[in-house]
Amino acid sequence: MSEEINKPNNFIRNLIDADLDKGKNEGRVHTRFPPEPNGYLHIGHAKSICLNFGLARDYKGQCNLRFDDTNPQKEDEEFVDAIKEDVQWLGFDWGEQPFFASDYFDRLYDFAVQLIKQGDAYVCDLNAEETREYRGTLTEPGKNSPHRDRTVEENLVLFDGMRAGQFPDGAKLLRAKINMASPNINLRDPAIYRIRQGVIHHQTGDKWCIYPMYDYTHCLSDAIEGVTHSVCTLEFEDHRPLYNWFLETLKTEHHPQQIEFSRLNLQYAITSKRKLTQLVEQGAVDGWDDPRMSTISGMRRRGYPAASIREFCERIGVTKADNSIEMSTLESCIRDNLNENSPRAMAVLDPLKIVITNYPEGQTEDLTAPNHPQQEAMGTRNIPFGREIYIDRADFKEEANNKFKRLVKDKEVRLRNAYVIRCDDVIKNADGEIIELRCSYDDATLGAAPEGRKVKGVIHWVSAEHGVKAEVRLYDRLFNHPQPDSDKTVDDFMVHLNPDSLATRTECVLEPSLLTAEAGKVYQFEREGYFCADAKLSSESKLVFNRTITLRDTWAKIEQQS
Ligand code: ATP
Ligand code: MG
C-alpha cells in the first residue's frame, strides 16, 4: 500500500494541496504548535500536536514547537519542561531546539516602534475600566480614546518611557490604531503592549517591564519563523482580521495563513488548562499527572500508549464542526492497542486463600504460561505453583446455579495455566466470613483435561508463597457528568467530580514476574483488566499498580439504562 492512501483527508490538507498546486510559499509546508507554558498539556492539545506535526511529517515540511510566553505571571519553567516531555512522548520531533516568543521580544519591540512611526499605534492613558467603556459593545460602536491623536514623537517618547519603567502597571498601553467603530471588536484599537513591573520572566528574567499581547506576538512570531500555515482553534476566527492587519501593516517578509478548526471536547473530561489548574490547586487530584486527569502526563502515567492517543486523534478527524467526542472512542483506541500488545499476567485483587490438601507440603513446581494467547513471539514465562494459592473472592460461591462458571463448593474449576481443583471444605471465622477453602487437585489435568472430562470455568490464581504483595489503584472517570464544565445548572464544575473515581485495593497479590515490571509498561491481568506499575508511587518496599482500563466498556451499559 502506498503511503498516500493512508493519509487522512481533511479540509486543511485540501487547502495545503491547493497552495502547493499554485506554488505558494515556494512549495514549503511549515506549521507550529504554540502552547502557552501555563499548565500541562491535555488531550485537546494532543489533537493539535498530531495535526500540526502530522502535516509537517506528511508534507516533508517542518513543525516548530513554540512557547507563546507573553504572560510571565502565569507561566513557569516547570510547564516548559513538561510540555517538551509530552510532545516527545507523543512521538514528535521539533528539530534542533524549541522556539520561544520571548526570543523575539527585541524584534517585537522594533515592530512596535515601526507601527508608531507609521502612525499605526499610539500610547493610551485610559485605565482598564475606561478602556472597556470606550470599546463599545457588540451592538454599539466604540469611541476614540482622547489620546488617539498623539503625535508620533510624543508616542515614541512615551513608549520608550514605558519600556524604561517610568510608569506603573496599568498606567499606559500601546494600542494599534485601527477602527473603534469596527463591527469586529478585536479591531477596536487592540492593546499591543502592557506594563508588568517587577515580574521575572522564566526566559528573559527582569529584562522587560512591558510585555506584548498575545494577538500581536502570535502572528509576528509565525511570520518571523516563516510558518506557512498557522493552524489554530475556532475561537481565533474573529482574530484572523487582526492577525492579517499586523502582518499587512508591518509588511513582513512572510505572511502565514491562519486556518481554524474546531477544538476537541471529550465527554467526562476537562480540556481547559484553567480548570485543570483548579483541580490540581484544590487538591482534587494527585497533581497534573494524576492518572485520572485528561492531561498527556496523566494518560502516560495511567498506561495509555502514545500510539493509541495518536490513533484517537486520527479517528476523530479535523473539521470546523462543534463536537463532543465520547469517552468510549478514546477507550476503544486504548483497548485495541493493549489487547494486541500487552503481555498477560495473573494477579488477585481480592485474595481468598486455598490450601490444596493433596498437594505435597513444601513442594513447588514451575508451570509455563504463554505471555500472549495469539502472539507466540511474545514467548512464555514460568509461574510457580504450590500447596497454597490465592484466588479472587468473587470467584467462589458456596452455592450457585450453572451460570456461575467459577468455583463452587463440591464442584470443579480449572486454574488458569495449571490444574483442575475441587472445593471440598469452606473454613469460616466466628463471624461466618469465609477465610479459607480446602481443595484437592487432580495431577492428570495439567494443560488439557483428560478425554471426556468437562470443566467449564477457568479462574486465575497466584501462589501464596511466591506471590508479591501490591497496592492496586482502580481508576474510573474523574467526572460523572458528560459535560462537567458546560452544565449551566451548577456554579462550579467540581460538583460533578465522581466520588468513586479511585478505589484502592491494598491487599493484592501478583504473580512474581511482576516484581520487576517496568513502570508504565502495561500488562493484561487476566480477567481483570489492564494495569501498569506506577512510576511515582512504586518503590523498592512497596509495589503500586494503576488500572489503565477495564477489559470492557462498563459505562456503555449504564449509559443505555439512563
Ligand atoms: P486552554 O484553553 O486549555 O488553556 P489554550 O488554547 O489556551 O488551551 P494553548 O497553550 O494556547 O492553550 O494551546 C496551544 C495550542 O493547542 C493552540 O493552538 C490551541 O488552539 C490548541 N488547543 C488547545 N486546546 C485544544 C483543544 N481542546 N482541541 C484542539 N486544539 C486545542
Ligand atoms: Mg491560549
Image (tube, rainbow, N blue to C red):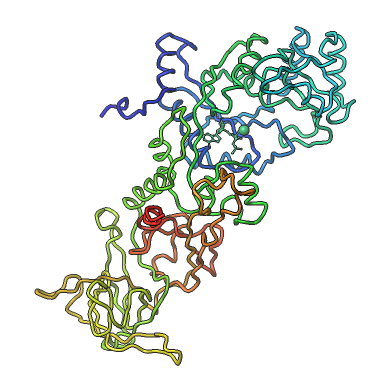
User: Where residue 184 sits in the image (x, y, percent)?
Assistant: 64, 18
Question: Residue at (49%, 48%) from the top-left corner?
Answer: 482
- Snapshot quadrant of residue 430: bottom left
Q: Is residue 552 left or right of residue 80?
A: left
User: Where residue 283 sits in the image (x, y, percent)?
Assistant: 65, 56
User: Where residue 501 sits in the image (x, y, percent)?
Assistant: 51, 59
In the rendered image, the quadrant that contains the C terminus is bottom left
Q: Is residue 491 left or right of residue 292?
A: right
**Total marks placed:** 0
Taking the view exactly as shown, the residue that stands out farthest to the bottom is: 430
Q: Is residue 182 above or below residue 70?
A: above
Q: Is residue 445 left or right of residue 155?
A: left
User: Where residue 547 sits in the image (x, y, percent)?
Assistant: 45, 59
- Snapshot quadrant of residue 208: top right
- Snapshot quadrant of residue 515: bottom left
User: Within the displayed image, which quadrant is ligand 2 positioned in?
Assistant: top right
Q: Is residue 517 above or below residue 47?
A: below
Q: Is residue 195 left or right of residue 289?
A: right
Of residues 115 and 60, the one drawn nearer to the viewer in this rendering? 115
Question: Residue at (69%, 41%) from the top-left corner?
Answer: 76
In the rendered image, the quadrant that contains the N terminus is top left
Taking the view exactly as shown, the residue that stands out farthest to the left is: 451
